Amino acid sequence: MLRHSRARYAEVDYRVTDGRARLRVTNDGADEPPGSGDGTGLTALAERLRAAGGELTWHRDGDRFMVTASLPLGSTGTTTDHVKEVAR
């Protein structure tokens, strides 16, 4: 988020629902489309999460960028929500 953007606003959302943990990070100020650089950050992270039974998705809408990671947990039926907003 800080490395690849001019973010003024960020939101971190963590939830555990139906046996899956989900972490979503959203920010404004996205400079360039994901994957347009020479790095492998999101692709490598997506591969590592898939190997653990999880998933990584990312989406850009104008200058807003969202990346979501999810992983299965050992127990089910628990729901926990945490949201933190960060502003520069």
Image: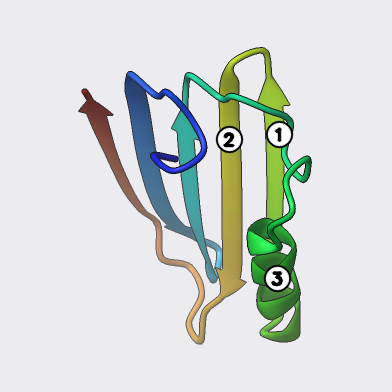
Labels 3 and 1 touching (C-beta < 8 A): no
Residue 20 x/y as whole percent: 55, 67
Labels 1 and 2 touching (C-beta < 8 A): yes
Q: Residue at x 71, y 50 (%)?
A: 57
Task: Say above or below: 56 vs 66.
Answer: below
Disc 1: which residue:
59
Q: The N terminus is located in which quarter?
A: top left
Q: Residue at x 68, y 58 (%)?
A: 39
Q: Which comes sooner in the sequence, label 3 or label 2?
A: 3
- Residue 44: mark in rendering: 3
Disc 2: which residue:
66
Foreground residue among 3 and 24: 3
**Color theme of the render:** rainbow
Q: Residue at x 54, y 71 (%)?
A: 19
Nearer the observer, disc 3 or disc 2?
3
Q: Callout 1, which amino acid?
A: His
Q: Which comes sooner in the sequence, label 1 or label 2?
A: 1
Residue 12 x/y as whole percent: 36, 41
Q: Callout 2, which amino acid?
A: Met
Foreground residue among 64 and 33: 33
Task: Say above or below: 1 vs 54.
Answer: above
Mark 3 to mark 2 CA distance (whole Å)? 17 Å
Residue 4 x/y as whole percent: 51, 38
Q: Callout 3, which amino acid?
A: Ala
- Left or right of 27 on screen, residue 31: right
Mark 2 Cα shell of 10 Å, populated few (<14), some (14-19), many (≥20): some
Q: The C terminus is located in which quarter?
A: top left
